[in-house]
Image (tube, rainbow, N blue to C red):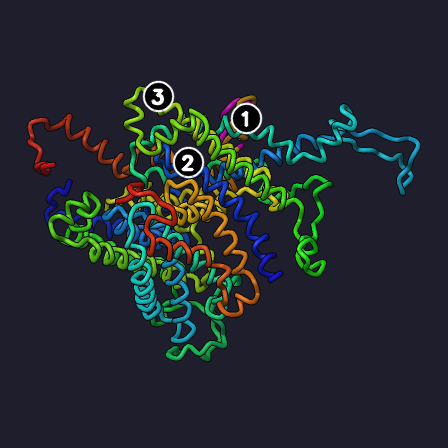
Amino acid sequence: MDVILLQLLNGLDKGGAYALIALGLTLIFGTLGVVNFAHGALFMLGAFCAVSFNALLGLEVVTVDETQTTAWGTPLEVRTPYVEAYLGDFGAWILNYSVPVSILIAIPVMLLVGFVMERGLIKHFYKRAHADQILVTFGLAIVLQEIIKSIYGANPIPQAAPVAVRGAADIGALFGFDPGVIVYPYWRMVYLAFAGVMIAGVFAFLQFTTFGMVVRAGMADRDTVGLLGINIERRFTIVFAIAAVVAGLAGVMYTPILPPDYHMGMDFLVLSFVVVVVGGMGSLSGAVLAGFLLGILQSFASMNEVKAIFPGIDQIIIYLVAVIVLLVRPRGLMGRKGVMEN
Amino acid sequence: MVTKISPARDYLLFGVFAIAVLTMPVWLAPIGAGYPDLLQKFAIFGLFATGFNLLFGLTGYLSFGHAAFLGVGSYTAVWSFKLLGMNPIPAAILAVVTSGVFALAIGYVSLRRSGIYFSILTLAFAQMSYNLAYSVLTPITNGETGLRVLESDPRLFDSSANADGPLISNLFGIEMTGYAGFYFCAVVLLIGFFIAQRIFRSPFGIMLRAVKTNQNRMNYTGLNPRPYTLAAFVISGMYAGLAGALMCITDPLAGAERMQWTASGEVVLMTILGGAGTLLGPILGAALIKYFENIFSAFNEQTLHEVFSFLPDFLEYPVVSVAGLFVGEGWHLTLGVLFMLIVIFLPGGIMEGVSRIGRLFKRSSSKAEPSGATAPAE
């Protein structure tokens, strides 16, 4: 029982990341009708917003402290980051909370990236075949990740979570299990909560605002909405930018869990596409459901007990589920009728 | 769309192509591509792309998992070396058979869906094979180290089984390295090209084009497209398996990274670059990508400074630093940019560009000539 609970928790945070990326993919697909293979790259760009912000904060000023000497007898050099030197305690606080604070940087950056991408490239591909859309966004993803690689190199760059949430909680003890059995890092809880808030935010935005209502109407039947005299294209541009922000923020917050490198986007993209297809093309709730479901299944499959029965199952479980779902329920778990049918 | 091409023209095309391929060492030497390792790659990836084109170019089904067949072919070839001996012919035949069986199984399942679902399904299968090859199937694939032929392997029908020579594939005494290896690959490529050409011109090929053009209409005519697409998928998988076997024939080592989805992406790129749905395009695309990969990866800052040394100093440095992003390690960036440009501006690939230019000349020279092919009624 405790093992199962532990795996459930482990699956949730990965599922959260899948769900957030898949949510953006579905939004773009449902509104613009574009299959965006560069969405993983947006996730990666978000993560590198956090890296850049941290690197910027890390710029140091070197002062020589004459009163102290090093082991070699030379005066001790004290390195203080500029922010700390100028802003004092507040600077230190920013340094500590660099990952969550970089959300503030990531939002405008990702909005801009999304806007430029949609207006500059995706717009011209509405009428082209899906194969062309896949290919051009795939090319874009390669370009983006190579640019990041040429700036930051090929090695993963670890990011630290704030000190306050660096440890792990003994959740098991709360539920009456033996202490030390179910230990769960705080940051993963933060991530889970963050994913929940983001998902709720997107749904609330679509459900309770006029803008969201128009977008939902556009997802159902874009021609009719256009006939009503609403400039649906402009709304869709904004939707694309929002989807970029969702993916970017998912990336920012994921950095303490997985040190970002240039190809993390591609790794997540392949899985997120599987998630979207399993959830059902064009179904937002399906994407979220499938994201968490596959995250949890993946972590169950990596249990030793399961691996003993089906060797190697942890490597293929997600793809296997996708194959089965596609064959049994061609529209995915919650797919709507008439979306992406041949 | 389908213009009538006389058999005589076909044979002429094949003849010219064959001569061009076989004399590659001569006419590619001046541009620095006249050495066997690279030429082998041209032939192998040309074959791979030709096979991929039979599926994507003709039926329009975009498979993102073709590298799986390449990997299966490679592993089969190495196992054939290990068990039967270093002769490349049984290795190639076995690789074609095994990858064909794999393609039949995967195709049977994947072809139930089309469009993006088909792409995702093939991708899923390829990733499964890749992950399994790395983990559980290590006894067969030797995991991360890669599968290679060892001195201690049985090699039943190998006369040199007990001699301790180098473990290189050899065809009745001819070692498959260097130019001999290239000519073996070239002959296989020519056979592959010839078969592809026959398929393009056959009623079967026309059926496949019908699938791409309008599957609904085909259904209404009472034709079931699935057997045709499945056959195309299997044939295309066999080509990939053969290409994988050739890789091992020229260098007897098979690794799982060959099956990764980036490798599948590469063959898509080659086909698109050259021109999907054309006969020569994919081979051209494969050769171009491999050639530029070779050239660009070898560039470094030093060579760039030499290239741009004609510029004044204040221009030279910025130009070199910008160009430096695109060469050496940054070769993939060039590839990505090129790929985007091709998809955006020239969806038909290089072959479309060539025929556009050709049409320009034709129009200016002979206006009186009536258009030969009548357009099909839409």
Inspect the image, locate mark 2, and give the three-letter code of the amino acid beneath it: Leu
Residue A233, picture quadrant: top left
**Residue at label 1?**
A108
Question: How far across and how far down the image is residue B84, in percent?
Answer: 38, 75
Secondary structure type for disc 2:
helix
Residue A291 makes an appearance in the image: yes
Chain letter for mark 1, please: A
Q: Residue at x 56, y 27 (%)?
A: B317
Q: Is residue B308 inside the magenta stretch? A: yes
Residue B95 vs A113, above or below: the answer is below
Going from the N terminus, do you reach mark 3 or mark 2 first?
Answer: 2
Secondary structure type for disc 1:
helix
In this rendering, position of residue B210 left or right of residue B368? right
Q: Which residues are magenta?
A: B305-313
Task: Estimate the spatial distance between the alpha carbons at disc 3 and disc 1, rounded to whole Å.
Answer: 24 Å
Q: Which labelled disc corresponds to residue A231?
A: 3
**Residue at label 2?**
A27
Chain letter for mark 3, please: A
Q: Residue at x 43, y 55 (%)?
A: A319
Going from the N terminus, do you reach mark 3 or mark 1 first?
Answer: 1
For the C terminus of chain B, the quadrant is top left
